[in-house]
Amino acid sequence: MASQDDPSAVAPYPQPPSYLWSQFTDENEAAITELRDKHEAETGEPCTPGTIVPDVPDALAALQPPELPPNGRWRVFGQMYSLSNQLPSLEEQGVVRLGAPIPPDSAEKDAHARKVFELKKLTKSLLLNFLELAGILAINPRDAADKLADLQTVFFNMHQHINEWRPHQTREALISMLQAQLERTRNETRALHEVTDSVRKTLVGLADVEDPLAGGGGSTAAAAGPKADSKAAPSQSASTQKSEAKPKRSRQDDVWAALEETFG
């Protein structure tokens, strides 16, 4: 891994380290897997790709996750980062605080009201300082440095208050997203229930329709059975099948028409 004191680690676009193409090979992957299995057998603890195996050769060092920085801070592309994701105070950043600090243990509603009040004061102060800067630039532009520093301090204080409000903003955004998701699910469920009820009513209505095949056709054939000769039987059977096929086809058309009207 590259050292924190290496100048290439501070460059905006440093060259990629050589171990990316020299150490990540199939042989090294198999070797580090074998070392993890051996370490798991010796210790009895499950090993994952994130487990740091001790006494690894230098050729396999890049295949393991790096150890945590000792002071909890590290540098990436010239920027310092910290493990503790905590917003630094204005005093830690060397900025003068304008107004009284808001205690973190105060009630949430009271804290939000005080933040709104402080932001309004800072906005008015920003406008006043801007007007004063315009007057200084019109009279003597050389004296504008102090007023620019005042404007920068006001901007830093406003930015700090906005950053301190990020947890509340995140919580409200999550609540809004969950409410929208719940409303969308309710609308989809309501639409499914409406379609189900419509289909159920259509099927019930089709079940109540009188069957045109029940009745006339069968009794006529039974009455004419003994008197009809054997030569007329095939033609009579064919005519009966045709008469039966026509009502069935008509009923199927009615079913399809009703379904198209329901879902169309």
Image (cartoon, grey):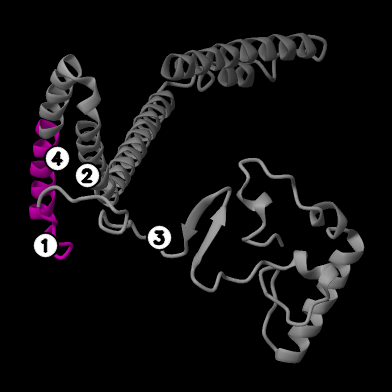
Q: Name the residue under label 3.
A: 85
Q: Distance between the residues labelled 3 and 2?
A: 20 Å
Residue 4 placement (x, y as % from top left): 62, 61
Asked if labels 1 and 3 touch by Cβ distance under 8 angstroms, the answer is: no
Crowd around label 1: few <14 · some 14–19 · many ≥20 (10 Å): few
Does dot 1 land on a helix, a strand or a loop?
loop
> In the image, which is nearer the foreground, mark 3 or mark 2?
2
Looking at the rendered structure, which numbered label has been put on residue 106? 1
Q: Main secondary structure of the magenta part?
A: helix
For badge 4, the amino acid type reads Leu
Which of the marked residues, 1 or 4, is nearer the chain's N terminus? 1
Q: Do the residues bearing badges 3 and 2 touch, measured as CB atoms within 8 Å?
A: no
Element on which disc 2 rests: helix
Label of residue 119 in the image:
4
Q: Which residue is drawn at 36% across and 30% down?
A: 191
Amino acid at dot 2: Asn
Q: Please give the range of residues in magenta.
A: 100-124
Which tag, 3 or 4, sits closer to the chain's start?
3
Q: In this view, does 92 lie to the left or right of 96?
A: right
Residue 87 figure quarter: bottom left
Q: Distance between the residues labelled 1 and 2?
A: 20 Å
**Amino acid type at image mark 3:** Asn
